[in-house]
Amino acid sequence: MKRPTIKDIALRSGVSKGAVSLALNGRPGVSDSTRERVLSVAAALGYRPSSTARALSGARADAVGLVLARPLGAEAFFFRLIGGIQAELPMALLLQVVGDLDEEVELYRRWWAEHRVDGVFLVDLRVDDPRVAVVEELGLPAVVIGGAGHHGNVASVWADDAKAMTSVVEHLTSLGHRRIARVAGLPSLLHTARRDAAFRAAVPSGVIVSADYTDSRGAAATRELLLGAEPPTAIVYDNDVMAVAGVGVAAELGVTVPAELSIVAWDDSPLCRLIHPPLTALSRDTSAFGARAARALLAVLAGASPIDTEDTTPVLVARASTGHSSRS
Amino acid sequence: MKRPTIKDIALRSGVSKGAVSLALNGRPGVSDSTRERVLSVAAALGYRPSSTARALSGARADAVGLVLARPLGAEAFFFRLIGGIQAELPMALLLQVVGDLDEEVELYRRWWAEHRVDGVFLVDLRVDDPRVAVVEELGLPAVVIGGAGHHGNVASVWADDAKAMTSVVEHLTSLGHRRIARVAGLPSLLHTARRDAAFRAAVPSGVIVSADYTDSRGAAATRELLLGAEPPTAIVYDNDVMAVAGVGVAAELGVTVPAELSIVAWDDSPLCRLIHPPLTALSRDTSAFGARAARALLAVLAGASPIDTEDTTPVLVARASTGHSSRS
DNA sequence: AGCTGGAGATAAACCGGTTTAGCTAGGTTC
DNA sequence: GAACCTAGCTAAACCGGTTTATCTCCAGCT
């Protein structure tokens, strides 16, 4: 048995294709009795509209897109984000990994030209990111995820990293820490820049070392800091993997945590909870964040004017890796 | 400037739509000179065929699908898998998360009927999984990922879990362990059943406790085992999170690792490497596994007859969490 | 010279929808 | 009773490709 098309419904209910289309989409132009008849025939046949055909005639594509330019960044973050997005989306998510930003932009152009997606999520925003301008030029509905601040006429869902950073620093200073350092993520990412700025504002004398989210670079950065002239008494890491690597380096150098060194991780995870000592971490519900982004995109697709939505600020979960400074 | 269509090329090169189609697809029916002219016009205009339109007229959809029925299972595994798949795929991946298997099956039917995908990956195979029969019935090209054994006429990419389990048990028995237990993943999953069987064959007296990959259930299972009448001297966990939770429970109960209890995790991860003590783990290249699955699906799409491909067997990486049994 | 065959191209149908122009019947209005 | 609406519907065009039936040449053969 073939899948029923709009033509089959038209035949069986004795009306034209056009009338069926109007009836099924709840648009005026057919009488209530006809509409009812068409709907019941459609239901009886188990009719499902073809989103492919719809997309071709200019209507919805019934899919939204997400492009990841490698490197992916923090693994667990994206997976939870995508899970959260999906949970809220009634349509499919077209996912593609590309090599660089140029390919990503090219892909948006193609997808949009082909009506393959109705909208896209923009992640991993860079400093001076070209993508915002592109989607605006195309008129491609989009939501910027995690890029604090306003981006042209594009909707944005973000968390207040600056406030979160401030809460971390307050936690540490209240414990007597004065020499606080930061091991940052990729400098090209916008949120790294924002966190850098917030950190500098809160700790004018603080040292920032750039890394790339990997354990090896996290370990190297930690070594650099602890072997320096004025080693910090507390380090804030931009993700969990680097923070855990930092714990390892400290142990290796005979620096006890938290007595001699306090450690804070950005983004909580099983890793933070299960390691010894458990890490104080900035926790957020990434899945809920994705869901919020999905709702934002749906709103834009429904015609709402793009607005910026602030997600809940990551909250500091104090665990055993932070304690009073011994050198205050 | 609008995106050029096949019609624009036809106009500018002075031939018909049909001839352009033949020329662009390298099919016979046009002369070499015409073909060349059409190709150069297409290149000059920056022509990109619309996969939406192609899909409608029955050709390739230029996308493959992956449906995840919640619960997702081991997070990191899927993310790396998808990354590996994407790296090898020249097309987009349609990803959708659904609530249960029935929805998943319904989605395959729709996608296929609409020519929305050219093929699908089947993951998380269940014992007596209905999906294999469905894709066979539909004639929807598919690749089963991680379901050991042969599945009807559907291609399969799998790793030899039985052999891997044997290597784990051999490692432990060579260290003098006789009372070995297993904390298993979801019993409904096929690979859980396969590992169970392999474990039973290798350790006839071994106890198996079912869990669900979460740290809480992993901890509970460990507690149950260690507080039992004949506590094991070694435990094999079905994922990293449960193994790490097991370490925590052991510490809590005053059972030292590895002196009194050896621990092995299935699937290596930063978590295994960074915890104290570092966990002996079954390591595999999940990303490469995904790439292999992608190649398998591409082969099926290209018309190859579906075959079973064996991935490299997970290899045991011995670390500090396993040691000689103190009770041998 | 007439017939056949094949290469090269075109026009048109088709995929499954949406959308627009146009038609018909019935009811108002003056 | 002619003119005018409007609701309700149909026919047809359209989206951007693929595919098939058909048509035109021209070369080759007898």
Image (cartoon, coloured by chain):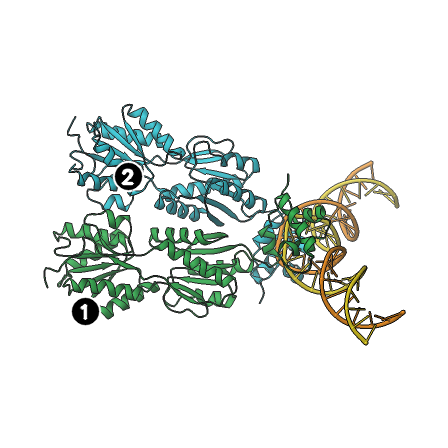
Chain colours: A cyan, B green, C orange, D yellow
Residue at 26% over, 30% down: A181
Label 2 crowd bin: few (<14), some (14–19), many (20+), radius 10 Å: many
Depth check: give the residue in front, B276 or A143: B276
Residue B98 visible in the shown view: yes
A163 vs A281: above or below: above
Q: Of helix, strand and loop, which one carries label 2?
A: helix
Q: Which quarter of the rendering shows the C terminus of chain A?
A: top left
Residue at 25% over, 52% down: B216
Tell me where residue A131 appears, x and y as whole percent: 50, 37
Q: Which amino acid does label 2 sit on?
A: Gly
Residue A90 visible in the shown view: no
Q: What residue type is labelled 1?
A: Ser
Q: Which mark is residue B205?
A: 1
Distance (Cα) linking label 2 and label 1: 44 Å
Output the chain of dot 2: A
Tell me where residue B144 appears, x and y as whole percent: 42, 63
Q: Of helix, strand and loop, which one carries label 1?
A: loop
Q: Quadrant of residue C28?
A: top right
B158 vs B21: above or below: below
Residues tagged by mark 2 and mark 1 found on one chain of the structure: no
Depth check: give the residue in front, B298 or A198: B298
Output the chain of dot 1: B
Q: In this view, does B163 lie to the left or right of A310?
A: left
Residue at 44% over, 65% down: B155
Q: Which mark is residue A218?
A: 2
Judged by depth in the image, the label closer to the viewer, 2 or 1, is 2
Tell me where residue B228 appears, x and y as whole percent: 15, 61
Q: Quadrant of residue A272?
A: top left
